[in-house]
């Protein structure tokens, strides 16, 4: 995505999935080897692929799909959405030595047929004449296939700030400053101050959690790359929401918030270039990164005045309910506190930006959690979390069936899919007219539904949209 603020919000709906194009080529290739060229199955698949490509080319004159380390990139930006479902198509093409497909405006359906046929025979012609020349000889002018030379696609990636920008809720801002100091203290080799940690926990529970503006800034997409201290504050707040939802008492909530706040403290011992490295890590780097769990537990065990569960959560938060994950602790099931932090951690990470990856929209993030429920995450906790934040969390920008853009400013507990909205213009400016999406007309039908969540061009000013009213 380029220069998001210059693009109307309407154009920023999630782009079409480039994997359909990879899958289309992979299955057409197989059909070419199975049926005669004029077979209706081939015609049907070709038409589907052509339609997919046309959708992409409406967004720009060139579609570039590259597979880097098994992760699909479109136009240089990672699109790693559902690796498992995509694995077969990716593998099929990669096995042929093709991990880059570029398609230009003006491509004809006949060229797609030729490319698929070429792919079927490709193994036989491997070596010798470059693919580009072979395709050109067959009259293909708008499609290029290539073995990806380790090209670095990061140069065109959007750079995200490393902390929230613009007006921030005052209590949330204060908590970020305190958390940054706490992490800096540990990073510089000094001892963690348990008094600061307790102040921070109280600040989060008694002030940040009471502010709708702060919650909106944490729940909606976060247009910054939040690697440690912001991430930690946000995970603490999301863990608190889950804890409240499942009815933990106040003392247990304080234990949970402390543990969530410090779950990633071990990252202060990992070299910053590994923590910040975009894309896949090499094996050695991955091992190093995984060690943040044991480093964290070590740091926290050595700090007097913390609660006993805090190091345990740091140790276990990357372990699944099935006992897999890291570090290897046999088949021990993580403590319920660790399980809560795992749910919050994943939601927070994917709704935040990463180098060359835009944040995932909340509704999609909830679907990711749902898919992980049972194997990796505790299903009851995922359910509690999704119920707590609802499908359209506070602060999300949505489009309605009346083609209005709006910010979610209040939840209707009896009708969470029809929240309170404030209408905005395409740039996210407002606040405009406030409407209740649960309102019905004279015949009892809803006046509007939400169609989708959209990524705002720039983060709307939640401190104006959501005055410091008590949180729901
Ligand atoms: Fe972690």
Image (cartoon, rainbow, N blue to C red):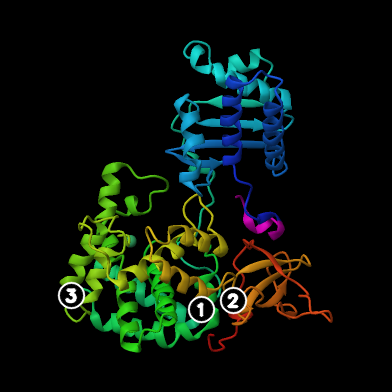
Counting from the top left corner in percent of width and height, residue 16 is at 64, 47
Neighbours of disc 1 within 10 Å: few (<14), some (14-19), many (20+): many
429 relative to 466 in the view: left or right = right
- According to the image, label 1 marks what residue? 214
Residue 254, placed above or below residue 68:
below
Residue 458, placed above or below residue 172:
above
Q: Residue 227 lies in what quarter of the image?
A: bottom left
Counting from the top left corner in percent of width and height, residue 431 is at 70, 77
- According to the image, label 2 marks what residue? 462
Segment tinted magenta in the rendering: 1-10
Q: Contact, CB < 8 Å: mark 1 with mark 2? A: yes
Neighbours of disc 3 within 10 Å: few (<14), some (14-19), many (20+): some
Is any atom of residue 190 visible in this view? Answer: no
Residue located at (55% from left, 79% from top): 213
Of callouts 1 and 2, which one flags the residue occurring earlier in the amino acid sequence? Answer: 1
Mark 3 falls on what kind of element? Answer: loop
292 relative to 457 in the view: left or right = left
In the image, is residue 266 part of the stretch drawn in magenta? no
Q: Residue 143 lies in what quarter of the image?
A: top right
Is any atom of residue 229 visible in this view? Answer: yes
- According to the image, label 3 marks what residue? 303
């Amino acid at each position: 995505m380029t220069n998001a603020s210059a693009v109307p919000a309407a154009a920023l709906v999630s782009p079409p999935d480039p994997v359909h194009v990879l899958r289309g080529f992979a299955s057409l290739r197989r059909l070419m080897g199975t049926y005669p060229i004029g077979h209706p199955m081939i015609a049907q698949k070709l038409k589907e692929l052509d339609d997919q490509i046309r959708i992409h080319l409406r967004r720009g004159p060139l579609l570039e799909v590259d597979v880097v380390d098994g992760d699909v990139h479109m136009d240089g930006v990672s699109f790693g959405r559902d690796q498992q479902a995509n694995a077969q198509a990716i593998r099929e093409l990669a096995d042929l030595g093709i991990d880059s497909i570029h398609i230009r405006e003006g491509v004809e359906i006949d060229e797609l047929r030729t490319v698929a046929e070429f792919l079927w025979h490709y193994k036989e012609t491997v070596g010798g004449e470059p693919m580009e020349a072979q395709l050109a000889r067959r009259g293909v002018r708008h499609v290029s296939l290539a073995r990806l030379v380790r090209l670095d696609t990061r140069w065109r990636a959007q750079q995200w700030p490393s902390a929230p920008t613009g007006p921030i809720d005052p209590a949330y801002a204060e908590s970020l400053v305190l958390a940054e100091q706490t992490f800096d203290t540990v990073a510089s080799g000094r001892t963690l101050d348990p008094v600061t940690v307790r102040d921070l926990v109280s600040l989060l529970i008694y002030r940040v959690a009471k502010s709708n503006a702060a919650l909106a800034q944490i729940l909606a997409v976060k247009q910054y790359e939040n690697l440690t201290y912001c991430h930690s504050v946000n995970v603490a707040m999301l863990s608190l929401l889950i804890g409240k939802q499942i009815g933990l008492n106040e003392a247990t909530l304080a234990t949970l918030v402390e543990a969530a706040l410090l779950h990633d403290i071990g990252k202060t011992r990992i070299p910053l270039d590994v923590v910040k490295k975009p894309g896949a890590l090499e094996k050695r780097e991955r091992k190093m990164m995984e060690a943040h769990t044991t480093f964290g537990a070590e740091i926290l065990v050595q700090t007097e005045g913390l609660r006993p569960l805090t190091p345990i959560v740091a140790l276990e938060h990357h372990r699944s309910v099935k006992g897999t994950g890291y570090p290897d602790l046999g088949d021990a099931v993580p403590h319920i506190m660790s399980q809560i932090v795992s749910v919050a951690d994943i939601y927070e990470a994917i709704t935040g930006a990463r180098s060359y990856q835009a944040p995932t929209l909340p509704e999609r993030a909830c679907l990711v959690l749902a898919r992980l429920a049972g194997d990796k995450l505790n299903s009851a906790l995922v359910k509690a979390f999704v119920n707590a934040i609802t499908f359209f969390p506070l602060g999300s920008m949505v489009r309605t069936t009346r083609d209005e853009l709006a910010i979610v400013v209040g939840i209707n507990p009896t009708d969470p899919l029809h929240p309170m909205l404030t209408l905005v213009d395409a740039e996210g400016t407002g606040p405009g007219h406030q409407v209740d999406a649960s309102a019905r007309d004279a015949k009892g039908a809803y006046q509007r539904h939400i169609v989708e969540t959209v990524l705002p061009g720039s983060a709307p000013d939640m401190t104006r949209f959501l005055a410091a009213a008590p949180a729901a």
